[in-house]
């Protein structure tokens, strides 16, 4: 049975650390940097061969940079022979563009899901899909309402009454 390795993207390191603490894991070693031309470089700092990899990266803040970083991290783990790669994306990038509302308009959310799949993601765990219509993401996405509860506990732990 493969072990779980949890990596954090740069979008929300605190959240990733809280998830790792809650699961009793250490975050995997990863180094991200930018070249002078602003290309993203990712180096996975440990072996993931045969491991079950989870990468936590939100689609908030610098959305395009964070998305590209996530795609590179997924691909790096996949070509390093990980058993399975799951992208944990609390806020799915381009989720608001989930349907064709005008002629010649793209369905950008589907494009993002396809890019994640091509990069090597076996599963996507998310909680913010903007609308309940997720046909564009069938077979790849897991919409987990309980993830909302889990994250609320991480951010706002219950207080102990004395």
Image (cartoon, grey):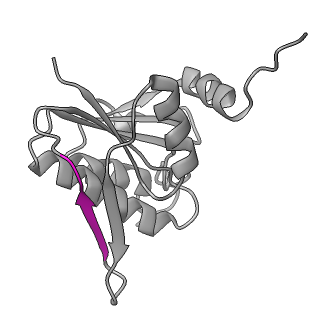
Against 110, residue 159 (above or below) is above
- Foreground of the two, 85 or 140: 85
Judge left or right: residue 49 versus residue 93. left
Q: Is residue 8 above or below residue 147?
A: below
Asked whether residue 78 appears in the rendered view, the answer is yes
Residue lying at the far right of the rendered structure:
162
* Residue 97 % position (x, y): 51, 54
Q: Is residue 96 left or right of residue 5?
A: right
Question: Toward which corner of the image does residue 161 lie, by quadrant?
Answer: top right
Residue furthest toward the top?
Answer: 162
The answer, for residue 133, to whether it is visible in the render is no
Residue drawn at (49%, 56%), measured in percent from left and top?
94
Q: Position of residue 56 (x, y in %)?
A: 43, 44
Residue at figure coordinates x 19%, y 48% from the top left: 77
Looking at the rendered image, the quarter that the N terminus falls into is top left
Observer-nearest of 146 and 27: 27
Asked if residue 161 is positioned above or below residue 136 in the image, the reply reads: above
Q: Residue at x 49, y 47 (%)?
A: 92
Quadrant of image for the C terminus: top right
Give the overall secondary structure of the magenta segment: strand
Residue 96 coordinates in the image, percent (x, y): 56, 52
| 153 in the magenta segment | no
Q: Is residue 23 left or right of residue 31?
A: right
| Total residue callouts | 0
Q: Which residues are magenta?
A: 40-46
Q: Position of residue 2 (x, y in %)?
A: 17, 23
Asked where in the image residue 122 lies, by quadrant, the reply is: top left
């Amino acid at each position: 049975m493969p072990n779980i390795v949890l990596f954090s993207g740069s979008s929300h390191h605190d959240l990733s650390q809280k998830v790792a603490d809650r699961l009793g894991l250490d975050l995997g070693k990863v180094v991200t940097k930018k070249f002078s031309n602003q290309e993203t470089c990712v180096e996975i700092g440990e072996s993931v061969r045969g491991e079950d990899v989870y990468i936590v990266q939100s689609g908030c803040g610098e959305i395009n940079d964070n998305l590209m970083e996530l795609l590179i991290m997924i691909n790096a783990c996949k070509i390093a022979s990980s058993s399975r790669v799951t992208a944990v994306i609390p806020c799915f990038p381009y989720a608001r563009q989930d349907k064709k509302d005008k002629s010649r308009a793209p369905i950008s959310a589907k494009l993002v899901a396809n890019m994640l799949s091509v990069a090597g993601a076996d599963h996507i765990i998310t909680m913010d899909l903007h609308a309940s219509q997720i046909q564009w993401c069938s077979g790849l996405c897991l919409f987990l309402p309980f993830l909302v509860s889990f994250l609320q506990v991480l951010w706002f732990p219950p207080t102990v009454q004395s």
